[in-house]
Amino acid sequence: KSISNSGTEYNASTTIFVNSAQVTATTPEAFLVSQEPFDVRVVNPSGLAATLEDALDCGGAPSWSTASGNLADVSEGDAVSTSALSATDPDGSAITYSETNATGTASANVLSSVGLSLNSNTGVITGTAPTGVSGDTTYNFYLSASDPQGNKTPRAFNIIIRDIVTLEFKL
């Protein structure tokens, strides 16, 4: 069985005693990152038991390749299409992207509030820059790179919308 850091116990769905030195167990899919690391307790058929502390975790957190900071600098009303974001998972799992708060624990909506959208698979931000900005405006937001096990790594980004100044000349 696996025992979370909060004491919750999970029984393996299958356990095979290969030989006196090897056991193969299938872990349940319900493991949560917030409960790692897990202790592993093995009880052999004769009743002998041993616990290996902090032996199992749900994997490492994603690592960003895209530097934090500015993703686009466009004039108001222009089309926005950023380059794809890039992050990798140390376990090789697929990464998804979402707009979150600074800690990655809650969703946020800076992008959608100004008419932009984030592709969760590629990390590309698209849309039309808002009009009517009074002066050049920087929109700051956080994006999180997440893996299927729930590991998240947030990073700070921004998009600058430039005010178009209209000059009128009279002759």
Image (spheres, rainbow, N blue to C red):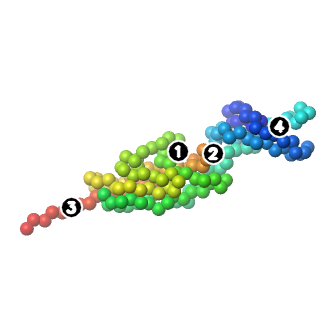
Write down the residue under mark 4.
Answer: 42
Q: Nearer the viewer, mark 3 or mark 2?
A: 2
Q: Nearer the viewer, mark 1 or mark 4?
A: 4
Is there a contact, CB below 8 Å, between mark 2 and mark 4?
A: no
Q: Which mark is residue 60?
A: none
Is there a contact, CB below 8 Å, between mark 1 and mark 4?
A: no
| Residue at 73% in and 32% down | 9
Q: Looking at the figure, which quarter contains the N terminus?
A: top right
Sequence-wise first label, 2 or 1: 1
Q: Circle 2 — which element?
A: loop
Is there a contact, CB below 8 Å, between mark 3 and mark 2?
A: no
Q: Is residue 3 above or below residue 64?
A: above
Q: CA distance from mark 2 to mark 1?
A: 14 Å
- Residue 53 visible in image: no
Sequence-wise first label, 2 or 4: 4
Amino acid type shown at disc 4? Val
User: Where's residue 154, x and y in %?
Assistant: 53, 49
Q: Nearer the viewer, mark 2 or mark 1?
A: 2
Task: Judge from the rendering whether residue 87 lies leftward or rightward of residue 91; answer left or right.
Answer: left
Q: Which mark is residue 104?
A: 1
Q: CA distance from mark 4 to mark 3?
A: 74 Å
Sequence-wise first label, 4 or 3: 4
Q: CA distance from mark 1 to mark 4?
A: 35 Å
Amino acid type shown at disc 1? Gly
Amino acid type shown at disc 3? Thr
User: Where's residue 127, x and y in %?
Assistant: 38, 55
Amino acid type shown at disc 2? Gln
Sequence-wise first label, 1 or 3: 1
Q: Which mark is residue 149?
A: 2
Write down the residue under mark 3.
Answer: 166
Q: Circle 3 — which element?
A: loop
| Circle 1 residues within 10 Å: few <14, some 14–19, many ≥20 | many
